[in-house]
Image: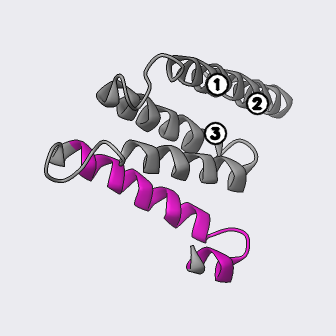
Amino acid sequence: MLPKDKTAVFVYNILKIILDNLVYLKAISAYQEALQIFTLKKYPEDYARTQSFMANAFLQMSDIRNKEENLNYAINANLEALEVYKPDNNSEQCARVSLNLGVTYGNLAKIGDQGKNLQN
């Protein structure tokens, strides 16, 4: 239940942002650690899945801080996942990651240098 006092609501919202930030940072760190084992060569499916999860964490993190930077990290992680997920070998995962990539590009297009974003 949310507090009704304006100050308490403000403090609650700040604490939620801080907690969300920490959760996403821990998730991203765990994914990066997993990628030390799940390499593209040795475990391509696990590599792609981990990259996809990490892309989603970066996308969520972009709502909290460093929007453009985290969106670019999300794009790169999605592109890495698409190195494994191809329409002919895993069409469902390829479609999911492609959809997430489109959402991320859409979010990036709303900020920064829109002309530069159109070139990418």
Q: In the rendered image, which residue does mark 3 sit on?
A: 61
- Of residue 26 and residue 83, the one placed in the foreground of this image is 83
Asked if marks 3 and 2 touch (Cβ < 8 Å), the reply is no
- Residue named by callout 2: 9
Q: Quadrant of the C terminus?
A: bottom right
The answer to whether 102 is drawn above or below residue 74 in the figure is below
Q: Are marks 2 and 1 in contact (CB under 8 Å)?
A: yes
The extreme front residue here reads 41
Q: Main secondary structure of the magenta part?
A: helix
Give x and y (percent) for residue 57: 54, 35
Q: Nearer the viewer, mark 3 or mark 2?
A: 3
Q: Residue at x 60, y 27 (%)?
A: 28
Residue at 27 percent of width and 44 percent of height: 85
Q: Which residue is at the far right?
A: 7
Query: Which residue matches tag 1?
Result: 2
Q: CA distance from mark 3 to mark 2?
A: 22 Å
Residue segment shown in magenta: 93-118
Residue occupying image coordinates x 68% and y 68%: 111
Q: Earlier in the sequence, mark 3 or mark 2?
A: 2
